[in-house]
Image (cartoon, rainbow, N blue to C red):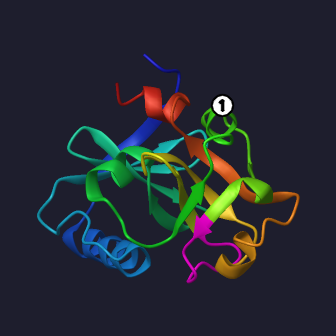
């Protein structure tokens, strides 16, 4: 089992679930958990986590909710994506930040500071969740330097806690 520490897990009220769900729906373009789904909020060492049943499908980073990589796989969002070339995949899955030259496509609606999910160009599978440091149009310009700060990726402690 992974060594992520989860404490103070408690069931959320219906109106709180609805508020988070509508915020995620507006950002990602798809419906996520419903008001009658069993959603729990828990504290961890890095950020708050959203459990749907026993699966960690969401996180709250700096007061903003977003899906984990498992949540992206389940709900298949259509917005806030960044696509990287296959050369960037091993680095991102090892926790590295996403650099500008590796980006081949990005959602134009992304603003600097938005939470985004990163996918590979070949399989279109989610690899990581991060904070964009550039707007959507700037992400595709392949400028050198860090473009997205990686906060959660396939293979990290949060991912392994769901296995």
- Determine whether 35 is above or below 84 in the image: below
Residue 21 location (% of width, % of height) = 30, 71
| Secondary structure category for the residue under label 1 | loop
Pinpoint residue 150: horizontal percent, then vertical percent.
67, 49
Question: What is the magenta range?
Answer: 105-114
Query: Residue 79: x and y, percent?
Result: 44, 73
Q: Residues within 10 Å of mark 1 (few under 14, many from 20)?
A: some
Instruction: Identify which residue is drawn at 28% across, 58% down.
Output: 75
Numbered-mark total: 1
The quadrant in which the C terminus is found is top left
- Camera-nearest residue between 7 and 139: 139
- Percent from the top left, x then y, of residue 101? 78, 57
Q: Residue at x 52, y 29 (%)?
A: 155
| Residue 31 among magenta residues | no
In which quarter of the view is residue 6 placed?
Answer: top left
Q: Quadrant of the N terminus?
A: top left
Main SS, magenta region, reads loop
Q: Residue furthest right?
A: 144
Q: Which residue corresponds to mark 1?
A: 94
Outermost residue, left side = 36
């Amino acid at each position: 089992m992974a060594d992520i520490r989860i404490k103070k897990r408690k069931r959320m009220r219906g109106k709180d679930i609805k508020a988070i769900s509508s915020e995620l729906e507006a950002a990602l373009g798809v419906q996520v958990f419903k008001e009658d789904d069993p959603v729990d909020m828990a504290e961890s060492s890095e950020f708050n986590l959203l459990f749907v049943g026993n699966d960690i499908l969401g996180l709250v980073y700096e007061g903003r909710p977003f899906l984990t990589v498992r949540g992206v796989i389940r709900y298949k969002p259509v917005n806030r994506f960044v696509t990287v070339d296959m050369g960037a995949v091993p680095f991102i899955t090892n926790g590295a930040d996403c650099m500008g030259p590796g980006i081949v496509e990005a959602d134009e609606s992304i603003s600097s500071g938005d939470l985004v999910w990163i996918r590979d160009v070949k399989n279109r599978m989610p690899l990581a969740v991060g904070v964009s440091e550039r707007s959507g149009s700037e992400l595709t310009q392949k400028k050198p330097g860090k473009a997205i700060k990686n906060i959660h990726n396939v293979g990290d402690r949060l991912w392994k806690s769901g296995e």
